[in-house]
Image (spheres, rainbow, N blue to C red):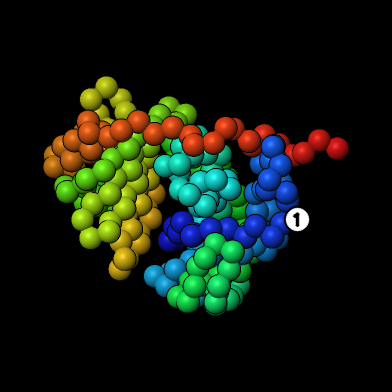
């Protein structure tokens, strides 16, 4: 089952996003209901197909985990069935031609990090291309390492890693450039050139911190 990280999720949920506190229960797409998410031209989703989608809270949904690393711990993995595609001409996010919204039926919703920690070993889960990294950032989130980097040709990469002494194990890998986007889950023990490349990126990475104060409360809003 393929995994996707949408450009952004629907915000027309009747929620006041300017409120000082938002409630995770109200933000999350509900199982059994339909929701919308936007993608660029690289995503080719087929009605009836079942996919995995990464849902992020509002700040990281709009700006990325690198702007609000703590929201990785609040992100979720959805299993969803594609209903239909809806072209996007223009919207409040400034996205124009070439972007699409898809409607999904939400089949399941789980917190992302427990899913990643429970993954079985998968030595060939994905391949890293971190040899020419330029600007790197890192943060510690719920016992995992979040690592991000840019590379030549407008390439952007992210990883979530477990560390046990000198050993690093990748759990999540995102690789994006103007021509492609891949998002992979899998417990891969890093060795050889891949391990050396990630250690180098960690060594040169700047610390990442939340750019906004905490604003999400877990659970539903009080009555």
Residue at image point 59% right, 32% down: 214
| Left or right: where 110 falls relative to 2 | right
**Furthest residue to the left?**
193
- The residue at which mark 1 appears reads as 14
Of residues 24 and 214, which is closer to you in this image? 214
| Left or right: where 217 falls relative to 5 | right
> Would residue 192 be seen by someone viewing this image from the given angle?
yes
| Left or right: where 138 falls relative to 90 | left
Residue at image point 33% right, 43% down: 148
Instruction: Using the image, determine if residue 42 lies above or below residue 127.
Output: below
> Would residue 77 be seen by someone viewing this image from the given angle?
no
| The image quarter in which residue 85 lies | bottom right
| Left or right: where 56 falls relative to 188 | right
Give percent across and percent down for residue 180. Answer: 32, 65
| The image quarter in which residue 121 lies | top left
Instruction: Using the image, determine if residue 176 lies above or below residue 118.
Output: below
Residue at image point 35% right, 62% down: 181
Of residues 114 and 76, which is closer to you in this image? 76
Of residues 151 and 85, which is closer to you in this image? 151
Give percent across and percent down for residue 67. Answer: 45, 41
Give percent across and percent down for residue 101. Answer: 56, 70
In which quadrant will I find the N terminus? Answer: bottom left
Residue at image point 44% right, 32% down: 209
């Amino acid at each position: 089952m393929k995994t996707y990280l949408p450009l952004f999720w629907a915000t027309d949920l009747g929620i006041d996003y300017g409120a000082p506190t938002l409630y995770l229960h109200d933000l999350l797409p509900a199982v059994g209901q339909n929701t919308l998410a936007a993608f660029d031209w690289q995503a080719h989703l087929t009605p009836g197909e079942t996919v995995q989608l990464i849902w992020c809270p509002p700040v990281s949904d709009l700006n990325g985990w690198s702007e609000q690393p703590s929201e990785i711990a609040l992100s979720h993995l959805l299993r969803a069935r594609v209903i239909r595609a809806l072209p996007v001409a223009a919207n409040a996010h400034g996205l124009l031609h070439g972007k699409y919204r898809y409607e999904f039926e939400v089949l399941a919703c789980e917190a992302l990090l427990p899913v990643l920690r429970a993954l079985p070993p998968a030595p060939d889960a994905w391949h890293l291309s971190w040899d020419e990294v330029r600007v790197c950032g890192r943060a510690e989130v719920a016992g995992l390492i979040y690592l991000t980097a840019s590379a030549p040709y407008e390439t952007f990469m992210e990883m979530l890693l477990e560390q046990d002494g000198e050993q690093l194990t990748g759990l999540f890998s995102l690789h994006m450039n103007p021509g492609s986007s891949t998002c992979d889950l899998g417990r891969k023990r890093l060795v050889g050139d891949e391990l050396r490349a990630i250690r180098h990126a960690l060594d040169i990475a700047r610390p990442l911190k939340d750019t906004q104060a905490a604003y999400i409360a877990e659970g539903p809003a009080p009555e």
